[in-house]
Image (spheres, rainbow, N blue to C red):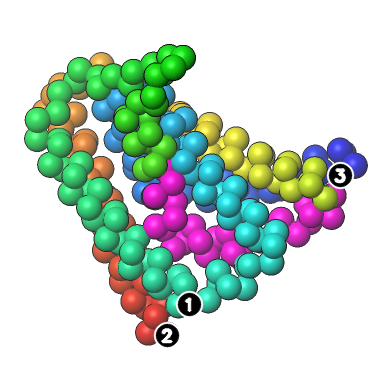
Amino acid sequence: MFSHLLALVIPWGLISLSGVMSPGPISTMAVTEGARRGYRAGPLISVGHAVTELVMVGALALGLSQLLQQATVAGVVGLMGGVVLAWMGLDIIKGARGASLSLEPIPEVTAGSPPSNQRVGLVSAGALLSVSNPFWLVWWATVGAANMLRFLEYGLIGLSVFYLSHISLDFGWNSLLAGLARSGRHLVGDRVFRGVLTLCGLLLIIFAVYFVVTGIGFLVH
């Protein structure tokens, strides 16, 4: 069985990379927060993203792929997602004005202490950016669902391998982006750093406009 699963994981991993590495809000946020708060921003954003994908995989396993492929669902997600991304983009641009190269710390969570707001914020951002992306929804309802059917032949073990192999790539890619963004801070000054943050904010706004236009297109057609 494991040899058969391995044969499925390799092509599934390559397909997953097409979604994981494609430019989008998650990648943009990993770069932005990696530069602002350090390399740990990547894994924290990935946690929120992974939670939404766990829910998605569970929904697909229960046979909800046809519902998620409906144009109305994708359209509503696109419109709502556009608003969320625009708000995030404007917030980043606003914060970039006074940004400096001193890292914003992410305090450690000790026994008996509540989770840091910054930690929770990054996890929430990862989840919010995922569910607000209509293309993430469509990708999972089509490409993801089609590949998942092959893993379901091996029951819960197959489904677990399907999910874990995908999110491991998410964690790896987002951590890499955050790490590169954090390392690159030593090579630039405050002015360049603020410019990068502003650019990331503008990219989120561009994604927001694209999502809104696409969402309207789904609803009209």
Residue 24 counted in the magenta span: no
Number of residues whose C-alpha sits closer than 10 Å to that of mark 2, classed few (under 14), some (14–19) or many (20 or more): few
Q: CA distance from mark 3 to mark 2?
A: 41 Å
Which of 105/42 is in front?
Answer: 105
97 or 186, which lies in front?
Answer: 97
Q: What is the residue that sits farthest to the front in this orientation?
A: 112
Identify the main secondary structure in magenta.
helix
| Magenta residues, start to end | 126-154
Splitting the image into 4 quarters, where does residue 218 fall? bottom left
Outermost residue, bottom direction? Answer: 221
* Magenta run includes residue 148: yes
Q: CA distance from mark 3 to mark 1?
A: 35 Å
Q: Residue at x 27, y 60 (%)?
A: 83
Give coordinates of residue 204: x percent, y percent. 28, 51
Q: Secondary structure at mark 3?
A: helix
Question: Could you tell me the amino acid type at mark 1?
Answer: Ala
What residue is shown with label 2? 221
Q: CA distance from mark 1 to mark 2?
A: 8 Å
Give the number of callouts: 3
Q: Is residue 17 left or right of residue 206?
A: right
Residue shown at 32% from the left, 30% from the top? 117
In the current view of this chain or complex, which residue is farthest to the right? 1
Q: Which mark is residue 71?
A: 1
Please report whichever mark, 3 or 2, sits nearer to the chain's N-terminal start: 3
Q: Secondary structure at mark 2?
A: loop
**The residue under label 3 is which amino acid type?**
His
Q: In this figure, which residue is indicated by the disc labeled 3?
A: 4
Asked if the residues shown at circle 3 and circle 2 are in contact, with their CB atoms under 8 angstroms apart, the answer is: no
